[in-house]
Amino acid sequence: MNAPVSEFRRAALTAQVDRVVNSTPVLDIHTHLYDPLLGDLLLWGIDELLIYHYLVAEGFRHLDLPCENFWILSKQRQAEILWNTLFIEHSPLSEACRGVLTTLHRLGLDVKQRDLPALREWFRQWNAETYVTHCLELANVRAVYMTNSPFDDIERPIWQKGFLRDDRFIAALRVDPLLTDWTRAAQRLLAWGYDVGEGFSPATLSEVRRFLADWTQRLESRYLMISLPPDFSCEPDSDCTRLIQGAVLPHCRDFGQPFALMLGVRRAVNPDLRLAGDGVGHSNLDTIAHLCAAHPQNKFLVTVLARENQHELCVLARKFRNLHPFGCWWFLNIPHLIDELTRIRLELLGVSFTAQHSDARVLDQILYKWDHTRRALARVLVEKYSDLAATGWEPTAAEIERDVRDLLGGSFERFLKT
Ligand code: RAT
Ligand code: ZN
């Protein structure tokens, strides 16, 4: 049997892994953050942090208030209600609440005062442009991928007009409405000058491809993305399947880009909660197996929301090198599950996956999301390298740096290039 590494060796390994994990810049491959030149779309600051939909869902566990009475309030008032409910009347133990405190702490603010007006005052010194640089540097994030939808009426005209891009914000083309509600999407495409018909004639599919190509070029987007419900399947005759096979996959092949699928979200389980009202369901991953096998020239970036799907996704990734698992998405982005998922993935895939994406909707959140992930990742890696050291295989500093770089965006970049 291998002798466990000495306490001294383990402490040295811990220090080394912590240093590497903290100093390796992250490529954040899926967020809802925006280039600051997209204007008010980029959210930041204490009130936005407090009204994050993860906190709204938790606040309503306690609030004795009809949802509609909450939504008509100003953002400031909503933030005050959630602050009082989740931080003052109860301890902020949940991951989303702790995240607000980690963020403030990383910004150098004194949270123990529990003083919301003072916190607000501190944020007044910033503007979006300077604050972006401050947060990216502090979080040690080298670039973030945005989520860019041509179906968004605020975002679309800004792209059409054009603006000087900030190269730390990379575009990803998001097309949920196209694949989940073709009837309505077709009307929009028609209105935008794409000559689509109701069925899926070759002419219609080629117009959909023209639409995807135009937006990929306009955004300079690097992948095409959709989130789908747990019952997503490639039924041969469904609109979604026809569009995927006849337009999305050929488009991705033309541009050499991955198709990113986020599976398992049940939208509007409680619509009164708006963005906070979505739930989770177990997906049938046979659909992913089928896509990967039937389309070896396509690349699939996949994350699944249900904990129960995680092991199966890793096994699939062992079968198909055109499948790249990424992130601990949404309800999985809690330390307990980051730990579990990272172990399962490392044990089944080595470093050929992307350990995390932040999914940040508010700029400042990258501080906590990456801080918490880095801690969880370092803990798991120390254990894994210790297991190797117990066999006599001592990882070198360069090897640890290479592995961490891969897990925090390097593997993803390689996958993009293959
Ligand atoms: O994590 C989230 O903020 C969700 O609301 C979703 O946006 C999800 O990440 C998605 O991209 O669909
Ligand atoms: Zn997202």
Image (tube, helix red, strand yellow):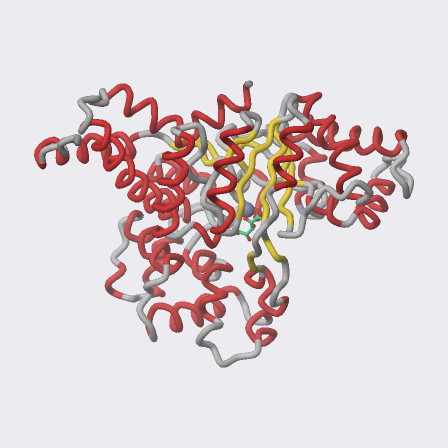
Query: Total number of numbered labels?
Result: 0
164 horizontally vs 399: left or right: right
Residue displayed at 59% across by 53% down: 265
Is 297 situated above or below 281?
A: above
Residue displayed at 72% across by 32% down: 248
- Observer-nearest residue: 159 or 286? 286
- Observer-nearest residue: 315 or 148? 315
246 horizontally vs 326: left or right: right
Question: Residue 328 occupies which quadrant of the picture?
Answer: top left
Is 155 situated above or below 222?
A: below
Residue 307 at x, y percent in the picture: 47, 51
Residue displayed at 61% across by 70% down: 272
Residue 141 at x, y percent in the picture: 39, 34
Q: From the image, which quarter does the C terminus lie in?
A: top right
Residue displayed at 48% across by 61% down: 51
Question: Residue 79 occupies which quadrant of the picture?
Answer: bottom left
Q: From the image, which quarter does the N terminus lie in?
A: top left
